[in-house]
Image (cartoon, grey):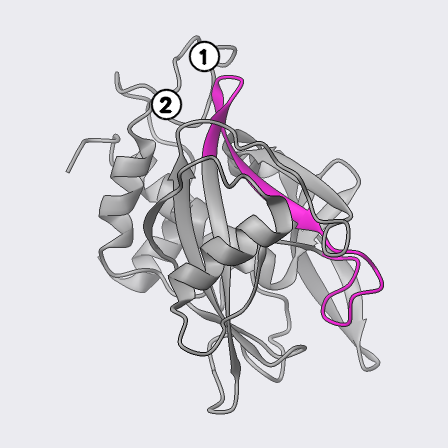
Amino acid sequence: MSAEQIRDLSDAPSPTWKTTPDPFFGPAVRGRTMSPQLPQWLAWRLGRPLPGPMVRSRFEPAPRPERHYDRIPADARSAAVLVLLYEHEGRWHIPLTLRPSHLPDHGGQVSFPGGAVEPGETASAAALREFREELGGAETPIELLGPLSPIYVAASNFRVAPWVGSCARRPVLTPSPAEVEAVLEIPLAHLLDPANFGSHRRQDQGTPYTAPHFQWGPYRIWGATCMILGELVTLLKELRAAGWQEP
């Protein structure tokens, strides 16, 4: 399957549901039980060719920014974020953070827990370390499932490596007040619902553009975070369209 075909699945209507339990929706939706096999399926998919950082998709700002998300300059700094899946109240969730407005990089925005890769450190190790530093949860083992596509963030000159992980239960989250203003625990079902996806107008140095976003209460999740979520949602819908058969 080509990258363009995979991207097209992100906008496709949901297929007919099969007998396999839906890994996203809890028992209150469709009377189904959440499947604990989602991490296994997702790890299998992450080990195969990925769609890419969702350029020219509905998740990328339009018109395309002058410094593209997929064109990573040689002097870009390395960073990593953790996209963590955990079970809570019968559903899979992902934690995002609202960054304090005083931070120099992306203050006041919603992002994944993460930060710069230290010298001699791998991106996956940095993603785990930054998650622990920002949100705690040291007592909960996290299994890394695989990486999503790297993405370039021009505003901070970071090459961001997103790593997907999972844990069997909700970690005890103790956010660092220096780095986290609020924690947003978002069900995957919310991200997959088209009603929660939209766009808004912004300006970059006087140039207007449209920024796609996921909506969670009063918060808009846009920019690189939206594009990373967009690739994850695309993979999940692709797996769902395939009927969630085990590899």
Local SS, label 2? loop
The one nearer the camera, 131 or 26, is: 131
- Magenta segment boundaries in residue numbering: 86-109
Residue 149 locus on image (x, y percent)? 39, 64
Residue appearing at x 47%, y 43% in the figure: 84
Q: Does the magenta stretch include residue 232?
A: no
The one nearer the camera, 17 or 110, is: 110
Q: Can residue 174 be seen in this view?
A: yes
- Tag of residue 9: none
Q: Does the magenta stretch include residue 107?
A: yes
Residue 196 locus on image (x, y percent)? 64, 38
Local SS, label 1? loop
Disc 2 versus disc 1: distance between alpha carbons?
Answer: 9 Å
Residue 110 locus on image (x, y percent)? 69, 53
In the picture, which quadrant includes the N terminus? bottom left
Give the answer, above or below, for where 133 lies relative to 152: above
Give the answer, above or below, for where 214 lies relative to 161: above
Q: Is residue 186 left or right of residue 35?
A: right
The one nearer the camera, 127 or 243, is: 127
Amino acid found under the numbered disc labelled 1: Arg
- Tag of residue 22: 2
Mark 1 closeness class: few <14, some 14–19, many ≥20 residues within 10 Å: few
Residue 30 locus on image (x, y percent)? 45, 12
Pointer 1 residue: 30
The reply to whether dot 2 and dot 1 touch (C-beta < 8 Å) is yes
In the picture, which quadrant includes the C terminus? top left
Instruction: Say which label, 2 or 1, has the lower sequence index.
Output: 2
Residue appearing at x 50%, y 56% in the figure: 129
Give the answer, above or below, for where 133 lies relative to 13: below
Q: In this view, does 45 lie to the left or right of 118?
A: left
Amino acid found under the numbered disc labelled 2: Asp
